[in-house]
Each structure stands twice: as C-alpha cells, then as structure tokens.
Image: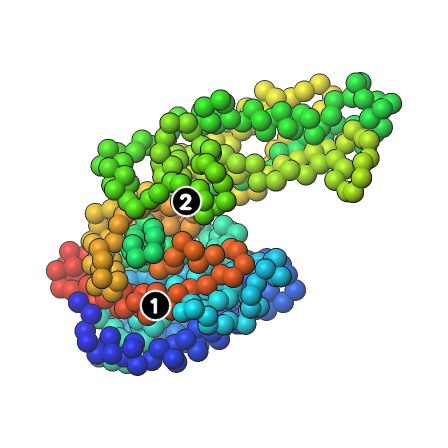
Amino acid sequence: MLPQPIRDYLLARREEHLAALKEFLSIPSLVNDAPGSAAAARQASDWLAGRLASLGLDSAVLETPGRPVVLALSRPIPGRPTLMIYGHYDVQPSEPLERWTSPPFRPQVRDGCVYARGACDDKGQLFAHLMAVEAWQRAGGGLPLNVKFFIEGQEEIGSPGMESFMADHKDELAADAVVISDSEFFADGVPSITYALRGLVLVELTVTGPAHDVHSGIHGGAVSNPVNVLAEMIAGLHDADGRVTIPGFYDDVLNLSDQERREWQALPFDPAAYAASLGVAELGGGERGLAALERRWSRPTLDCNGIIGGYTGPGGKTIIPSRASAKVSMRLVANQNPDKVIEGIASYVRQHQRPGTVAEFAVLSKSRPVLLDRHSFAMASAAAAMEEAFGRRPVMIRCGASVPVTEIFQRIFGMDAVLMGLGLPDDNPHAPNERFRLEHLWRGSEASAALMGNLSAEKVASRLA
Ligand SMILES: [Zn+2]
C-alpha cells in the first residue's frame, strides 16, 4: 500500500519533477561516438550522482573502459531487504533530425507527453524511481528498505564490458530484488510486466571476389559475382515455411507452455491493426502457422538488416563488384546459446562457398536470451504496486528485444529482475519524436514507491532473509 503522504508529495511536486527530468533530457548523452558524446555521458553521470546524493544516497561515478557507471546506495537499514534499480542514461542517435517536431535535446511538453530523445528509453522511466526515493525520504519518514541504483551508459550498444564490471562489483551490486523499467505496456491502459527477453547474435557476412571491381562485359560469365553469391546466401537462410536453415538453429529452443499460449490468446491483440500500424497489409514474417505473438516473443528469428555492395550511385556502372557484405541479426529465445548458433553460422557459411569467391563472417555482438521466474515475491510485489498505481492488474508478457544486464543478473547473481515497463507502444523509442506520457511518469513514480513499500513488508522481509 502506498501511504497517502507519499501520494500527496508526488502530486505536489509534479512541476518540479518535470523541470528536473527536462534538465536530464537536455544532456545529449548519445551512446555513439558523435562529437561531445563522451563529455555528455560524464555530464549525465554527474547529474545523476548529484541528484541521488541530494536524496541522501551515497553515490559515486565509476570509471569503466567505456562510459561511466553511477552506483548509489541508501543509508543501510539492517534487517531490511535491498532493492536494486537498474537503468541507463545513454540514448540512441536522433537522426533523421528533420523528422523531429522539436529538437531531440530540447525537451518540450505537448499533448500530455514530454518529447525528447531518451524521454521513454530510458531517462524518463529511470527518473520515476528517483522520484519515488525522494518521496519516501522527504514525506514517508525515510526509505522503507535499502535501495541501490546501478545506472550505466552503454545499454543501447549491448552493454559491452558490463558483465566483467558486474562480476568485479559483486558486493556493491548484491540485492534481494532488481527492478528494471526499460520496457513498455502491452497496450495503452494495459499495464504489463515482462518476464522474458530475446537474446541476440549480430554478424556481418562478407563475400570477396576479384581483387577490384571489373568490367561486367569483358569479364561477365567468367568471374563469380560477390553480390550474386551473397544474395543467394541470404535467400537460403529461410526455407519455404519461414524456418531458419542454419544447422542446429532450433535444437535448444524451449517450447511455449499451454498456459502461456492461453494467456497470450487472451491479450487484447489485433493482428490486422498491428499490421496496419506498421504500414504493411499482412504479417508475413517468421514461421508459417504460428500466431504473431509467438513469432515475436517465443520463437527465434533471423533478419538481414542491411546489404552493402557494388555500385549504388546515380545512373549505371557496369561492373562485377569485388566485394559485398550484409549485416544479419538473429533474435534468440530461452535455452538457445549464442555460441552454438555462431557455430551453426560457421557451418552454413562453409556450405555456401562458391568457386572464385570467399565467404566469411564476423560476430559484431551477442547476448543470451532470458526467461524470468513469473512467480517470485518481487514479481508479485511489483504486480500489486502497478495495480495500485495504474488501477489495473498487469498482464504478464514477453518481449522480443533485449536488455543485456537482465540475463547477467540471473546468471552471475542468481537474481531474476522484475521488468516493470512504464512506456507505451507508441512512445517512439529509437525513432524521431520519442516521448513519455506524463501520466506514466506520475503513476510510474507511485508504482515504484508502492513497490518499495511492498518489498519492505514484514512477511516479504522474512521470506527474503
Ligand atoms: Zn533502453
């Protein structure tokens, strides 16, 4: 239960909290190497550490080989459980800039939403938790449990180096529960808790032919064409039923339980409306005969993300290109091992060598899938907190995307995070006009505060001890 003084405090401070969030959103903490982004990452870390210190937390900015990490810890209360809150301050690039109604790093409030890069992913969602800590500290007589923050700056590129950072800081990061708000509601008005994320293998396939581009008239018919060979390789990655042909790809896939299938069928999901929202007439991707949510959540997929090769300028240029390459991503589901998938790719590439060309691949990134315990105390506490704040019991969903630390928390710390998403499906994360609905900021902070109260409840504390 959320104490009334906490509710009142959050209500009274809305203007102040929005102003602070806008300040945070104004920092262009881009995850890429754009000029100034490293300095902005430092600025964002300092801003967070300063804000957390002002809330009475012992906070520090820690150096890593990449962007800094912010760690903060509330004054220890012996005998109380510890809640870890993870978030990230890095944001995706904002191009194409001309598609933004207001500039990405000049936050603007329109139609009940704050618009800015990072508004939803993840600064706004993270900030809701800071508001909750503040409310407990200033109006609730102090935090009802121990709170830790772990905020990183490279989530958007797969959290490189985070696994070793987390292993090196095992004691500082130890907690009884982890909450991550970096996901979204299933639909407007349908609060959701996510209990599975897909993993990722991203590779670049390269086919090399003649030492340089050659004349397609003089040499055509004699020399293999790397673009043709690459196209054949990509086309061969799916069979006629939409199944991925990489050897062993489906070997370890965990099948969906009947109960989950029934729950998903009960979700308010209209495939036609979903297709229309994406501007397509039909949902033609993935394996034939399976429901769209299964294809997006519980089945692995493979997609070519881009092809580079040959002449692509205006007019024609009659050549046989010397080289072609493609980026290919695979989304993995529970029980699949990225390394085993990579072995399968190696054997696929070996089988598709063609005379006079060399096909190779390089792994650009990989992360494991994660399936979380749906029946943990933390999960139940979060569900009750969301119900209290948003007025409706959350549905349990999976998500096709990845938040790499979730899997690391499970594997290294044995902790199943609670993915309490506060965003909405049309918040445009990673896209122009990213936004966060203010109502979700207000209610999200209440949900976070309620979660802290629920987790501190005596029976939970004794169960966790
Ligand atoms: Zn995110």
Q: Can you say whether 59 is above or below 155 in the image?
A: below
- The amino acid type, in three-letter code, at marker 2 is Tyr
Pick out the residue farthest to the left. 459
Label 2, residues with CA under 10 Å away: few <14, some 14-19, many ≥20: some
- The amino acid type, in three-letter code, at marker 1 is Glu
Q: Nearer the viewer, mark 2 or mark 1?
A: 2
Where on the picture, by quarter, is residue 27? bottom right
Kindly indicate whether the residue at mark 1 contacts the one at mark 2 (C-beta within 8 angstroms).
no
User: Residue 235 location, x and y as percent?
Assistant: 58, 26
Q: From where the camera sits, is residue 252 visible?
A: yes
Return the residue at label 2. Answer: 274
SS label for mark 1: helix
Q: Is mark 2 within 8 Å of ligand 1?
A: no
Return the residue at label 1. Answer: 439
SS label for mark 2: helix
Where on the picture, by quarter, is residue 32? bottom right
